Amino acid sequence: AEVRLLLYRCASSCGRMQDAVVGLRGLLADAAPPLLDEAVALAERLLEQEGYLGLAPAAARARRRLGQVERAAALFERHLEREPEDLEARRELAQLLEGAGKHEK
């Protein structure tokens, strides 16, 4: 998994963004916490600096797995601003907020 992350970092810095984005989605789904934190940081960098907003749901799920509820919620909300009809993301956000004792906006 560490080698995969290194390859995705290289792909993103070499202009092969699509390869990095596709690979990161899978890594975000199955990486263990120490590596997961690094992977989600790279995903958020691509999301913020390169505009790959499609990474937001995968990054949100990773933040949720890391116990970072506020950051996960912010990523789901950002995704839903762009894709308001994504019922799966809306459901995941509602469950996340309900579990944290908050209500969806």
Image (tube, helix red, strand yellow):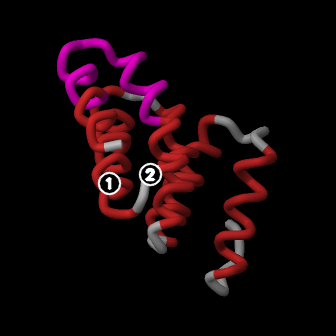
Q: In this view, does 8 lie to the left or right of 91?
A: left
Residue at (46% x, 61% y) in the render: 63
Q: Is residue 23 magenta?
A: yes
Residue placed farthest to the top in the image? 15
Q: Which residue in the structure is indicated by mark 1?
A: 35
Label 2: state its secondary structure: loop
Query: Do labels 2 and 1 touch, CB within 8 Å?
Result: yes
77 lies above or below 95: above
Count of numbered tags: 2
Badge 1: residue crowd in 10 Å (few <14, some 14–19, many ≥20): some
Horizontal side, residue 24 vs residue 30: left or right: left
Q: Residue furthest bottom?
A: 101
Q: Quadrant of the N terminus?
A: top left
Q: Where is residue 94 in the image (x, y as percent from the top left)?
A: 73, 66
Judged by its main secondary structure, the magenta piece is: helix
Hey, what amino acid is under mark 2?
A: Ala
Q: With respect to residue 62, does 44 lie above or below?
A: above
Nearer the observer, 24 or 76: 24
Q: Quadrant of the C terminus?
A: bottom right
- Circle 2 residue: 31
Residue 12 painted magenta: yes
Q: Considering only vertical position in the picture, is 20 above or below 99?
A: above
Please state the horizontal and vertical placement of residue 81, each as a whole percent of the image: 61, 43
Examine the image and state in which quarter residue 42 appears.
top left
Give, as a single range, the part of the protein colored magenta: 8-24
Q: What residue type is labelled 1?
A: Leu
- Residue ID at (52%, 37%): 26
Q: Quadrant of the rendered structure where residue 33 is?
A: bottom left
Between 91 and 61, the residue placed more toward the observer is 61
Question: Of residues 66 and 44, which is closer to you in this image?
Answer: 66
Crowd rating for badge 2 (residues with CA inside 10 Å; few <14, some 14–19, many 20+): some
